[in-house]
């Protein structure tokens, strides 16, 4: 296997292999790495021994080894010892294949298993609860019935036991090794053989042996799939049945249900919709935050309106003042709702503030025509939106629809007779240049990387954000640890985050005034209140 050498030598992804804008670890870049979930795909196929181990303990593997030996001896007349050994690896689907080839094997497998206590009533009842069970003859004439409480508990303990106990996982995965050793078809390095020759009896080597067994099991499975990509198709089909039945016979469990039940000393309750809660009061230390922000924005507007302005080429002042004002309005609005003072619900505010700062600083270093370009790009988008909205059929147009379309047409600033408005569908107003490139050109790349990217990921619902904020693990192990929607809201009230938003708005106000070269006298007069009273700040020059 050829492992590519890293070609990314700096930054947070140093040590990766870069291909275009995709970064891979050297191992992932080989193209042969396949990350699988054995619990989902393989454990259902190993359900029989997993049930026995949880019911009778880990020492019961010794009875399975004796079972393998006895079955191999009684099927020796078929002269396919190596093939038979491969089918006695604990998988239900492999037992089914064994009997398809050698019909007399079913009675032998069951007889030897019962003789060694591997098919108790509880184990057979649990297995028989699933329709389409591979090798169904294993449970005899037990009818398929819905999973009962004792069956659910046994299966749950079997799944949980494997998930929590690496040694038990290794024991299940060692079944093939033991079977092939007895058939004389096992081969490996001398070190591995020495490690496994007294496994699992020698406690001093158990941890190392467990790791070796798990590694060999995965490697062998991959090797089999190289030769026959469809080899485990039956196991996957059975796994779908197993998890599907579990989803119908047991419900999802949330952590808060378990906590509530433990507090009350009762069983886990049924899921209930989240109850309403009173609006959150203003968090301590933030009482004057909204008032301050309103005054800050008012003073910004006052400074602009009392200072001389270039009314001949007014695009720059319109764009700068419009962006800062829009940012201020958003911050003021969100400061009135403390529930939004958290990353989940307030990410759009942080993203908007960073984006606005990059726009302001990048446009400030460009030709002044960029401000008109910014406006025309937006006007073209308004024209496009009005055309798209006008495509709706008459029956879908609600009251006020025509007024909305007319407003978009007005915002396009297009002539009623001469259609001169250009529609630019590139990603940004800067001829498609990304905001990341703008940040880099404005010397704000670190600011973009450290502040914008994270907030943007939340705003765009990247999966890590959805998983963190909107999902939680189902604690029903019979559901395979899938994720379920969370019924708990992020409570917000993060005063430090709200203060950071206000600080960023403050920096936008300063930047806007500086970019516009607003008269210092007008600025001082408008912001005089900030230098009054104890502990106040002065607006930077």
Image (cartoon, rainbow, N blue to C red):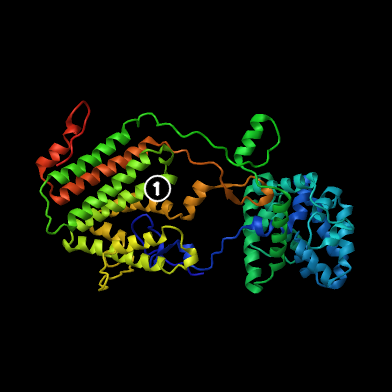
Q: Residues within 10 Å of mark 1 (few under 14, many from 20)?
A: many
Left or right: 51 in relation to 353:
right
Vertically, is 117 above or below 373? above
Spot the residue most to the top: 534
Tally of numbered tags: 1
Indicate the quadrant where residue 41 lies: bottom right
Q: Is residue 186 visible?
A: no
Q: Is residue 314 visible?
A: yes
Residue at screen point 22% across, 45% down? 509
Residue at screen point 67% across, 51% down? 479
Q: Which residue is mark 1?
A: 347
Q: Position of residue 532 (x, y in %)?
A: 18, 29
70 or 10, which is in the foreground? Answer: 10
Q: Quadrant of the C terminus?
A: top left
505 or 404, which is in the foreground? Answer: 404
Q: Position of residue 74 (x, y in %)?
A: 88, 65
Vertically, is 517 above or below 391? above
Q: Position of residue 282 (x, y in %)?
A: 40, 31
Q: Secondary structure at mark 1?
A: helix
Q: Position of residue 200 (x, y in %)?
A: 71, 49
Left or right: 437 in relation to 168:
left
Vertically, is 262 above or below 228? above
Residue at screen point 62% across, 63% down? 219
């Amino acid at each position: 296997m050829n492992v590519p050498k890293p070609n990314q030598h700096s930054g947070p992804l140093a040590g990766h292999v870069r291909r275009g804008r995709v970064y891979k670890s050297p191992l992932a870049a080989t193209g042969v790495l396949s990350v699988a979930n054995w619990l989902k795909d393989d454990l259902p196929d190993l359900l029989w021994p997993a049930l026995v181990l949880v019911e009778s303990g880990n020492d019961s593997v010794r009875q399975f080894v004796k079972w393998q030996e006895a079955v191999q001896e009684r099927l020796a007349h078929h002269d396919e010892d190596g093939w038979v050994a491969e089918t006695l690896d604990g998988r239900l689907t492999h037992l089914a294949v064994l009997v398809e080839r050698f019909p007399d094997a079913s009675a032998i497998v069951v007889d030897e298993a019962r003789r060694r206590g591997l098919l108790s009533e509880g184990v057979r009842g649990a297995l028989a609860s699933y329709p389409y069970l591979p090798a169904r003859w294993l449970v005899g004439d037990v009818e398929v019935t819905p999973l009962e409480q004792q069956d659910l508990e046994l299966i749950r303990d079997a799944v949980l036991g494997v998930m929590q106990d690496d040694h038990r996982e290794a024991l299940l995965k060692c079944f093939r090794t033991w079977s092939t050793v007895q058939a004389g078809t096992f081969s490996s390095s001398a070190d591995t053989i020495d490690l496994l020759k007294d496994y699992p009896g020698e406690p001093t080597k158990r941890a190392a042996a467990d790791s070796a067994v798990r590694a060999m099991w995965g490697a062998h499975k991959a090797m089999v799939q190289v030769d026959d990509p469809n080899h485990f198709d039956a196991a996957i089909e059975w796994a779908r049945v197993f998890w599907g039945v579990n989803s119908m016979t047991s419900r999802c469990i949330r952590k808060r249900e378990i906590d509530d039940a433990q507090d009350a000393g009762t069983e886990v309750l049924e899921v209930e919709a989240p109850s309403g809660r009173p609006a959150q009061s203003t968090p301590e230390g933030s009482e004057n935050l909204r008032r301050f922000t309103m005054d800050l924005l008012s003073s910004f507007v006052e400074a602009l309106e009392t200072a001389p302005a270039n009314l001949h080429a007014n695009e720059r002042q319109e764009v700068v003042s419009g962006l800062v004002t829009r940012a201020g309005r958003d911050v003021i609005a969100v400061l009135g709702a403390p529930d939004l003072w958290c990353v989940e619900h307030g990410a759009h505010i942080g993203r908007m503030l960073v984006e606005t700062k990059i726009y302001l600083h990048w446009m400030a270093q460009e030709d002044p025509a960029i401000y008109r370009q910014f406006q025309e790009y937006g006007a073209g988008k308004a024209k496009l939106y009005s055309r798209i909205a006008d495509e709706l059929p008459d029956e879908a147009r609600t009251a006020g629809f025509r007024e909305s379309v007319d407003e978009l047409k007005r915002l396009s600033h297009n002539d009623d007779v001469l259609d001169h408005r250009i529609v630019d569908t590139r990603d940004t107003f800067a001829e498609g240049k990304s905001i990341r490139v703008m940040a880099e050109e404005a010397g704000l790349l670190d600011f973009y990387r450290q502040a914008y990217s994270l907030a943007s990921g939340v705003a765009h619902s990247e999966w890590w954000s959805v998983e963190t904020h909107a999902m939680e693990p189902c604690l029903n192990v019979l559901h395979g640890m899938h994720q379920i929607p969370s019924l708990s809201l992020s409570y917000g009230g993060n005063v430090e985050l709200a203060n950071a938003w206000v600080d960023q708005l403050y920096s936008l106000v300063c930047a806007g005034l500086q970019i516009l070269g607003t008269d210092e006298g007008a600025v001082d007069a408008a912001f005089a209140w900030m230098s009054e009273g104890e502990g106040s700040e002065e607006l930077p020059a």
